[in-house]
Image: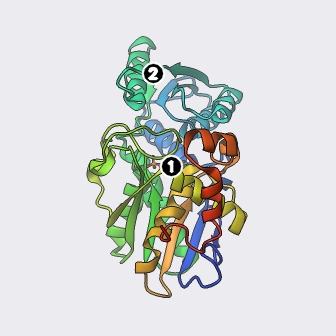
Amino acid sequence: MPSPITSLDGLFGPQQQVRVMAKLDLLQVSGSTKERTAASLLAGLMERGELQPGGTVVESTSGNLGSALARQCALLGVRMIAVVDEFANVAALQAMKAYGARVVRVPTPEDGNRLRARVLKVAELLEEIPGAVTTNQYGNPDNARAHDLTTMPEFVSALGAPPDRMYVAVSTTGTLLGCQNAIERAGWPTVLVAVDAAGSVLFDGERGERRLPGLGAGFVTELSRHTRPGAVRRITEADMVRGCRMLARREGILSGASTGAIVAAIGQDLDAMEAGTTVGMLVHDGGLPYLPTVYDDDWVSANIGDVDALDTSLDLANPFTAR
Ligand SMILES: Cc1ncc(COP(=O)(O)O)c(C=O)c1O
Protein backbone atom coordinates (compact mmCIF):
# COMPACT_ATOMS: atom_id res chain seq x y z
CA MET A 1 0.00 0.00 0.00
CA PRO A 2 1.45 3.47 -0.81
CA SER A 3 2.46 5.43 2.29
CA PRO A 4 2.44 9.23 2.69
CA ILE A 5 5.57 11.37 2.43
CA THR A 6 6.04 14.33 4.75
CA SER A 7 8.71 17.04 4.82
CA LEU A 8 10.82 17.37 7.97
CA ASP A 9 11.59 21.07 7.81
CA GLY A 10 12.78 21.55 11.37
CA LEU A 11 14.72 18.33 11.89
CA PHE A 12 18.08 20.11 12.02
CA GLY A 13 16.81 23.39 13.46
CA PRO A 14 15.43 26.58 11.89
CA GLN A 15 18.54 27.14 9.72
CA GLN A 16 18.18 23.81 7.91
CA GLN A 17 19.12 24.35 4.26
CA VAL A 18 18.16 20.98 2.83
CA ARG A 19 14.73 19.47 2.20
CA VAL A 20 14.28 16.21 4.10
CA MET A 21 11.37 14.12 2.81
CA ALA A 22 10.33 11.14 4.93
CA LYS A 23 8.22 8.24 3.69
CA LEU A 24 6.02 7.07 6.56
CA ASP A 25 6.16 3.29 6.21
CA LEU A 26 5.32 3.05 9.92
CA LEU A 27 1.75 3.54 8.65
CA GLN A 28 1.78 0.26 6.72
CA VAL A 29 -0.91 -2.10 8.11
CA SER A 30 1.56 -4.29 10.03
CA GLY A 31 3.66 -1.26 10.96
CA SER A 32 6.77 -1.38 8.78
CA THR A 33 8.42 -1.40 5.35
CA LYS A 34 8.36 -5.20 5.59
CA GLU A 35 4.66 -5.10 4.66
CA ARG A 36 5.84 -4.47 1.08
CA THR A 37 8.53 -7.15 1.29
CA ALA A 38 6.11 -9.78 2.65
CA ALA A 39 3.56 -9.11 -0.10
CA SER A 40 6.19 -9.50 -2.81
CA LEU A 41 7.77 -12.65 -1.29
CA LEU A 42 4.40 -14.44 -0.95
CA ALA A 43 3.23 -13.31 -4.40
CA GLY A 44 6.42 -14.74 -5.92
CA LEU A 45 5.95 -18.13 -4.23
CA MET A 46 2.32 -18.29 -5.34
CA GLU A 47 3.09 -17.17 -8.90
CA ARG A 48 5.66 -19.97 -9.23
CA GLY A 49 3.19 -22.53 -7.76
CA GLU A 50 5.48 -23.24 -4.78
CA LEU A 51 2.83 -22.19 -2.23
CA GLN A 52 -0.94 -22.70 -2.09
CA PRO A 53 -3.60 -22.04 0.55
CA GLY A 54 -3.13 -24.63 3.32
CA GLY A 55 0.66 -24.65 2.80
CA THR A 56 3.35 -23.63 5.32
CA VAL A 57 5.82 -20.76 5.19
CA VAL A 58 8.92 -20.75 7.44
CA GLU A 59 11.02 -17.61 7.82
CA SER A 60 13.79 -16.24 10.01
CA THR A 61 12.82 -12.79 11.22
CA SER A 62 13.80 -10.29 13.91
CA GLY A 63 10.25 -9.05 14.10
CA ASN A 64 8.87 -6.84 11.37
CA LEU A 65 8.92 -9.33 8.50
CA GLY A 66 7.34 -11.88 10.83
CA SER A 67 4.42 -9.57 11.66
CA ALA A 68 3.89 -8.69 8.01
CA LEU A 69 4.13 -12.30 6.80
CA ALA A 70 1.89 -13.58 9.60
CA ARG A 71 -0.74 -11.00 8.71
CA GLN A 72 -0.63 -11.77 5.01
CA CYS A 73 -0.48 -15.55 5.54
CA ALA A 74 -3.66 -15.23 7.62
CA LEU A 75 -5.34 -13.52 4.66
CA LEU A 76 -4.10 -16.20 2.24
CA GLY A 77 -5.01 -19.18 4.47
CA VAL A 78 -1.34 -20.20 4.76
CA ARG A 79 0.35 -21.49 7.95
CA MET A 80 3.32 -19.47 9.13
CA ILE A 81 6.26 -20.36 11.39
CA ALA A 82 8.48 -17.49 12.51
CA VAL A 83 11.99 -18.33 13.71
CA VAL A 84 13.14 -15.56 16.05
CA ASP A 85 16.01 -14.85 18.43
CA GLU A 86 16.13 -13.57 21.99
CA PHE A 87 16.39 -9.96 20.84
CA ALA A 88 13.16 -9.95 18.83
CA ASN A 89 10.65 -7.33 19.90
CA VAL A 90 8.14 -8.84 22.31
CA ALA A 91 5.36 -6.79 20.73
CA ALA A 92 6.22 -8.18 17.28
CA LEU A 93 6.10 -11.76 18.61
CA GLN A 94 2.73 -11.08 20.18
CA ALA A 95 1.44 -9.63 16.91
CA MET A 96 2.64 -12.71 14.97
CA LYS A 97 0.86 -14.99 17.42
CA ALA A 98 -2.27 -12.84 17.24
CA TYR A 99 -2.30 -13.36 13.45
CA GLY A 100 -2.13 -17.13 14.10
CA ALA A 101 1.59 -17.76 13.45
CA ARG A 102 3.73 -20.23 15.41
CA VAL A 103 6.84 -18.66 16.93
CA VAL A 104 10.04 -20.68 17.44
CA ARG A 105 12.69 -18.92 19.56
CA VAL A 106 16.36 -19.81 18.97
CA PRO A 107 18.85 -19.18 21.82
CA THR A 108 22.00 -17.11 21.15
CA PRO A 109 24.79 -19.49 20.06
CA GLU A 110 28.28 -19.40 21.57
CA ASP A 111 29.72 -17.44 18.63
CA GLY A 112 26.98 -14.80 19.12
CA ASN A 113 25.82 -15.07 15.49
CA ARG A 114 22.07 -15.05 16.07
CA LEU A 115 21.13 -14.51 12.44
CA ARG A 116 23.01 -17.63 11.32
CA ALA A 117 21.47 -19.67 14.16
CA ARG A 118 18.02 -18.67 12.93
CA VAL A 119 18.85 -19.57 9.32
CA LEU A 120 20.00 -23.04 10.46
CA LYS A 121 16.75 -23.53 12.38
CA VAL A 122 14.73 -22.62 9.27
CA ALA A 123 16.59 -25.30 7.29
CA GLU A 124 15.80 -27.85 10.01
CA LEU A 125 12.06 -27.02 9.95
CA LEU A 126 11.94 -27.19 6.15
CA GLU A 127 13.33 -30.74 6.36
CA GLU A 128 10.79 -31.70 9.00
CA ILE A 129 7.55 -30.26 7.58
CA PRO A 130 6.33 -31.77 4.29
CA GLY A 131 5.80 -29.17 1.56
CA ALA A 132 7.00 -26.28 3.73
CA VAL A 133 8.70 -23.42 1.89
CA THR A 134 10.73 -20.45 2.99
CA THR A 135 10.44 -16.95 1.68
CA ASN A 136 14.24 -16.63 2.11
CA GLN A 137 14.24 -12.88 2.64
CA TYR A 138 18.08 -12.78 2.62
CA GLY A 139 18.51 -14.00 -0.93
CA ASN A 140 15.16 -13.82 -2.72
CA PRO A 141 15.05 -11.24 -5.55
CA ASP A 142 11.31 -10.79 -4.81
CA ASN A 143 12.40 -8.97 -1.63
CA ALA A 144 14.15 -6.29 -3.71
CA ARG A 145 11.36 -6.33 -6.32
CA ALA A 146 8.94 -4.91 -3.73
CA HIS A 147 11.03 -1.76 -3.39
CA ASP A 148 11.95 -1.53 -7.05
CA LEU A 149 8.26 -1.54 -8.01
CA THR A 150 6.75 0.40 -5.10
CA THR A 151 9.03 2.19 -2.59
CA MET A 152 11.25 4.14 -5.00
CA PRO A 153 8.64 4.90 -7.70
CA GLU A 154 6.20 6.14 -5.01
CA PHE A 155 8.94 8.44 -3.72
CA VAL A 156 9.66 9.93 -7.12
CA SER A 157 6.04 10.37 -8.06
CA ALA A 158 5.20 12.09 -4.74
CA LEU A 159 8.20 14.44 -5.07
CA GLY A 160 7.72 15.03 -8.79
CA ALA A 161 11.45 14.28 -9.27
CA PRO A 162 14.03 11.84 -7.90
CA PRO A 163 15.62 12.98 -4.60
CA ASP A 164 19.30 14.04 -4.76
CA ARG A 165 20.14 11.65 -1.95
CA MET A 166 18.21 8.65 -0.64
CA TYR A 167 18.91 7.12 2.81
CA VAL A 168 17.88 3.50 3.43
CA ALA A 169 18.64 1.34 6.49
CA VAL A 170 19.97 -2.14 5.73
CA SER A 171 19.50 -5.62 7.11
CA THR A 172 18.82 -8.11 4.31
CA THR A 173 19.58 -5.11 1.99
CA GLY A 174 16.37 -5.86 0.07
CA THR A 175 15.06 -2.30 0.44
CA LEU A 176 18.40 -0.85 -0.67
CA LEU A 177 18.76 -3.20 -3.65
CA GLY A 178 15.21 -2.54 -4.83
CA CYS A 179 15.74 1.23 -4.66
CA GLN A 180 19.08 0.79 -6.46
CA ASN A 181 17.47 -1.24 -9.26
CA ALA A 182 14.78 1.41 -9.78
CA ILE A 183 17.35 4.23 -9.73
CA GLU A 184 19.75 2.50 -12.15
CA ARG A 185 17.04 1.43 -14.60
CA ALA A 186 15.54 4.93 -14.78
CA GLY A 187 18.98 6.61 -14.82
CA TRP A 188 18.06 8.90 -11.92
CA PRO A 189 20.99 10.89 -10.46
CA THR A 190 20.08 9.95 -6.87
CA VAL A 191 22.98 9.08 -4.55
CA LEU A 192 21.89 6.02 -2.58
CA VAL A 193 23.21 5.85 0.99
CA ALA A 194 23.21 2.54 2.93
CA VAL A 195 22.71 3.11 6.65
CA ASP A 196 24.19 0.19 8.57
CA ALA A 197 24.78 -0.55 12.26
CA ALA A 198 28.17 -0.52 13.94
CA GLY A 199 28.88 -4.21 14.57
CA SER A 200 27.18 -5.36 11.34
CA VAL A 201 29.36 -7.32 8.89
CA LEU A 202 27.63 -5.95 5.78
CA PHE A 203 29.85 -3.79 3.53
CA ASP A 204 33.06 -5.13 5.12
CA GLY A 205 31.94 -4.14 8.60
CA GLU A 206 33.62 -5.52 11.70
CA ARG A 207 31.48 -7.88 13.76
CA GLY A 208 30.41 -6.46 17.11
CA GLU A 209 27.62 -6.54 19.63
CA ARG A 210 24.26 -5.13 18.47
CA ARG A 211 21.35 -4.83 20.87
CA LEU A 212 18.80 -2.94 18.80
CA PRO A 213 16.83 -4.88 16.16
CA GLY A 214 15.93 -3.73 12.65
CA LEU A 215 19.24 -2.96 10.97
CA GLY A 216 22.58 -4.64 10.45
CA ALA A 217 23.39 -8.30 9.81
CA GLY A 218 25.64 -10.96 11.33
CA PHE A 219 26.44 -12.48 7.93
CA VAL A 220 26.85 -11.17 4.40
CA THR A 221 23.42 -11.66 2.82
CA GLU A 222 23.13 -12.92 -0.75
CA LEU A 223 21.19 -9.80 -1.77
CA SER A 224 23.92 -7.51 -0.42
CA ARG A 225 26.39 -8.92 -2.97
CA HIS A 226 24.44 -7.10 -5.68
CA THR A 227 24.31 -3.72 -3.97
CA ARG A 228 26.41 -0.73 -5.02
CA PRO A 229 25.50 2.10 -2.64
CA GLY A 230 27.02 5.52 -3.31
CA ALA A 231 28.01 5.64 0.37
CA VAL A 232 27.78 3.54 3.52
CA ARG A 233 27.24 5.12 6.94
CA ARG A 234 27.87 2.97 9.99
CA ILE A 235 25.96 4.21 13.01
CA THR A 236 26.53 3.52 16.71
CA GLU A 237 23.63 2.61 18.99
CA ALA A 238 24.13 5.89 20.90
CA ASP A 239 23.55 7.82 17.66
CA MET A 240 20.53 5.64 16.80
CA VAL A 241 19.00 6.58 20.16
CA ARG A 242 19.87 10.26 19.58
CA GLY A 243 18.30 10.15 16.12
CA CYS A 244 15.10 8.54 17.39
CA ARG A 245 14.70 10.94 20.29
CA MET A 246 15.40 13.94 18.05
CA LEU A 247 12.81 12.83 15.48
CA ALA A 248 10.21 12.34 18.21
CA ARG A 249 10.83 15.71 19.86
CA ARG A 250 11.31 17.87 16.78
CA GLU A 251 8.99 16.28 14.25
CA GLY A 252 6.58 14.29 16.42
CA ILE A 253 7.46 10.99 14.77
CA LEU A 254 8.02 8.05 17.10
CA SER A 255 10.25 5.71 15.11
CA GLY A 256 12.32 2.56 15.50
CA ALA A 257 16.10 2.31 15.81
CA SER A 258 16.87 2.03 12.09
CA THR A 259 15.09 5.31 11.38
CA GLY A 260 17.08 6.92 14.20
CA ALA A 261 20.20 5.64 12.44
CA ILE A 262 19.07 7.30 9.21
CA VAL A 263 18.56 10.62 11.00
CA ALA A 264 22.10 10.29 12.40
CA ALA A 265 23.53 9.47 8.94
CA ILE A 266 21.85 12.52 7.39
CA GLY A 267 23.16 14.63 10.28
CA GLN A 268 26.72 13.39 9.67
CA ASP A 269 26.48 14.28 5.97
CA LEU A 270 24.62 17.56 6.37
CA ASP A 271 27.60 19.95 6.25
CA ALA A 272 28.76 18.46 2.95
CA MET A 273 25.37 18.96 1.26
CA GLU A 274 24.62 21.98 -0.92
CA ALA A 275 21.73 24.23 0.10
CA GLY A 276 18.53 23.04 -1.57
CA THR A 277 19.54 19.38 -1.68
CA THR A 278 16.52 17.07 -1.54
CA VAL A 279 17.05 14.16 0.85
CA GLY A 280 14.73 11.14 0.81
CA MET A 281 14.49 8.84 3.81
CA LEU A 282 12.33 6.00 5.02
CA VAL A 283 10.65 5.85 8.39
CA HIS A 284 10.96 2.06 8.35
CA ASP A 285 8.86 1.37 11.45
CA GLY A 286 7.18 3.00 14.43
CA GLY A 287 8.59 3.49 17.92
CA LEU A 288 6.05 1.80 20.18
CA PRO A 289 7.93 -1.54 20.34
CA TYR A 290 11.09 0.45 21.20
CA LEU A 291 9.60 2.29 24.20
CA PRO A 292 11.27 -0.15 26.65
CA THR A 293 14.70 0.36 25.01
CA VAL A 294 15.48 3.40 22.84
CA TYR A 295 13.07 5.69 24.69
CA ASP A 296 13.62 4.31 28.21
CA ASP A 297 16.18 6.29 30.23
CA ASP A 298 17.06 3.38 32.53
CA TRP A 299 17.67 1.03 29.59
CA VAL A 300 19.77 3.64 27.79
CA SER A 301 21.86 4.34 30.93
CA ALA A 302 22.45 0.63 31.49
CA ASN A 303 23.19 -0.30 27.87
CA ILE A 304 24.29 2.75 25.89
CA GLY A 305 25.83 5.36 28.20
CA ASP A 306 25.21 8.66 29.96
CA VAL A 307 21.59 9.45 29.19
CA ASP A 308 21.84 13.07 30.43
CA ALA A 309 24.76 13.81 28.10
CA LEU A 310 22.90 12.17 25.25
CA ASP A 311 19.76 14.19 25.89
CA THR A 312 21.71 17.44 26.37
CA SER A 313 23.33 16.94 22.97
CA LEU A 314 19.83 17.24 21.49
CA ASP A 315 19.87 20.96 22.33
CA LEU A 316 22.31 21.37 19.41
CA ALA A 317 20.81 21.93 15.95
CA ASN A 318 22.86 19.03 14.61
CA PRO A 319 24.13 16.78 17.42
CA PHE A 320 25.87 14.51 14.90
CA THR A 321 28.58 16.94 13.79
CA ALA A 322 29.16 18.88 16.98
CA ARG A 323 31.42 16.27 18.54
C1 LIG B 1 12.76 -1.42 10.90
C2 LIG B 1 13.41 -1.69 9.58
N1 LIG B 1 14.65 -1.23 9.37
C3 LIG B 1 15.30 -1.46 8.21
C4 LIG B 1 14.70 -2.15 7.17
C5 LIG B 1 15.46 -2.47 5.92
O1 LIG B 1 15.70 -3.83 5.93
P1 LIG B 1 16.13 -4.70 4.66
O2 LIG B 1 17.54 -4.36 4.35
O3 LIG B 1 15.96 -6.11 5.14
O4 LIG B 1 15.22 -4.37 3.53
C6 LIG B 1 13.40 -2.60 7.34
C7 LIG B 1 12.74 -3.25 6.24
O5 LIG B 1 11.59 -3.46 6.21
C8 LIG B 1 12.73 -2.38 8.58
O6 LIG B 1 11.48 -2.82 8.80
Q: Is residue 29 visible?
A: yes
Indicate the position of residue 123 as horizontal and vertical percent values: 37, 21
Residue 132 to residue 39: above or below: above
Would residue 193 appear left or right of 84 to someone viewing this image? left
Indicate the position of residue 163 as horizontal and vertical percent values: 47, 76
Task: For marks 1 and 2, give the one nearer the viewer.
Answer: 1
In space, the residues marked 1 and 2 are separated at their CA atoms by: 37 Å
Amino acid at dot 2: Ala
* Residue furthest bottom in the image: 275
Indicate the position of residue 187 as horizontal and vertical percent values: 33, 75
- How would you rate the neighbour count of disc 1 (Cα within 10 Å): few for under 14, some for 14-19, many for 20 or more? many
Residue 240 to residue 274: above or below: above
Q: Residue at x 53, y 52 (%)?
A: 238
Quarter holding residue 304 = top right
Q: Which residue is mark 2?
A: 132
Q: Earlier in the sequence, mark 1 or mark 2?
A: 2
Q: Which residue is mark 1?
A: 237
| Contact between labelled residues 2 and 1, with CB atoms less than 8 Å apart | no
Secondary element type, mark 2:
loop
Quarter holding residue 133 = top left
In which quadrant of the rendered image does the N terminus lie? bottom right
Pick the front one: 40 or 8: 8
Secondary element type, mark 1:
helix
Q: Is residue 296 visible?
A: no
Pick the front one: 310 or 104: 310
Pick the front one: 98 or 168: 168
Amino acid at dot 1: Glu
* Residue furthest top in the image: 128
Q: Residue at x 57, y 23 (%)?
A: 54
Quarter holding residue 291 = top right
Query: How is the structure coloured here?
Result: rainbow
- How would you rate the neighbour count of disc 2 (Cα within 10 Å): few for under 14, some for 14-19, many for 20 or more? some
